[in-house]
Image: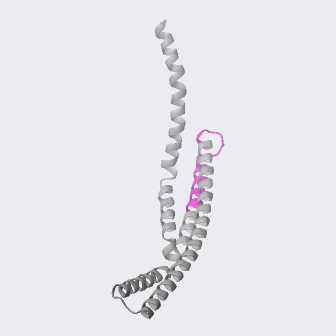
């Protein structure tokens, strides 16, 4: 009698946990089966976002070099105890260069921020699309949609190709700014 009660308790405990494990593993299987390159595409977008400053702000690097040169020249003049006029001229040049650099950096930062906001918005839209595709796949796998396998496969392939084409458009826009 005790064995039967223990067996019933085990069934009551294990069956729901097995069902939960099966449900969670089906999402993992869906991710592996249908979205194998999704994370790679997201990482490509993030990498392209990091390179935005190089593409959008080609003037920052030369201005930085120019500022470094004027600062070095001023420092060397101070060390060599040059005349006050020469020091004043070098200091004015250094200040002018730092102001130009700061203005360029500010403009660059605004451009990069705007492009990053737009690309993050596009990533969110793609993620919403992915969630809808996952939902459709789960509905089909549960047998609730009434679609044939061919119709389902065709629908999923169209949705996936649409989603990955959105990635390609986003990546092209980030790389060709």
- Who's the residue at 63% across and 58% down the image? 125
> What residue do we see at 49% from left, 10% from top?
4
- Picture mark count: 0
Return the residue nearer the eye: 29 or 107: 107
Q: Which residues make up the magenta segment?
A: 140-164
Image quarter of the C terminus = bottom right
Whole-percent x, y for residue 68 in the image: 41, 81
Identify the image quadrant of residue 169.
Answer: bottom right
Residue sitting at 47 percent across and 65 percent down? 47
Identified at 50% across, 76% down, the residue is 55
Task: State the image coordinates of residue 105 (x, y, percent, origin top left).
Answer: 53, 76
Viewer-closest of 62 and 11: 62
> Where does the image place residue 139, in percent across and percent down from the top left?
62, 42
Q: Is residue 7 above or below residue 43?
A: above
Answer whether residue 148 is magenta in the image. Answer: yes
Is 68 placed above or below 4 here? below
Foreground: 161 or 89?
89
In the rendered view, tell whether residue 71 sits above or below residue 169: below
Magenta stretch: helix, strand or loop mostly: helix
- The outermost residue toward the left is 80
Figure coloring: one colour
Taking the magenta stretch, the answer to whether it contains residue 105 is no
Give x and y (percent) for residue 48. Answer: 50, 68
Q: Quadrant of residue 167?
A: bottom right
């Amino acid at each position: 009698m005790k064995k039967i009660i223990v067996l019933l308790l085990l069934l009551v405990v294990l069956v729901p946990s097995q069902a939960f494990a099966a449900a969670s593993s089906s999402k993992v299987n869906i991710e592996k089966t249908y979205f194998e390159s999704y994370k790679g595409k997201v990482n490509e977008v993030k990498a392209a976002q990091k390179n935005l400053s190089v593409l959008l702000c080609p003037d920052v690097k030369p201005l930085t070099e120019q500022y470094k040169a004027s600062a070095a020249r001023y420092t060397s003049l101070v060390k060599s105890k040059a005349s006050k006029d020469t020091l004043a001229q070098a200091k004015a040049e250094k200040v002018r260069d730092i102001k130009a650099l700061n203005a360029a950096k500010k403009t660059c930062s605004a451009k990069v921020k705007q492009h990053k906001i737009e690309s993050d918005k596009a990533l969110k839209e793609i993620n919403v699309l992915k969630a809808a595709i996952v939902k459709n796949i789960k509905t089909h796998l549960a047998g609730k949609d009434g679609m044939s396998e061919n119709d389902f496969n065709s629908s999923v392939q169209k949705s996936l190709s649409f989603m990955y084409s959105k990635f390609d458009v986003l990546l092209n826009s980030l790389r060709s700014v």
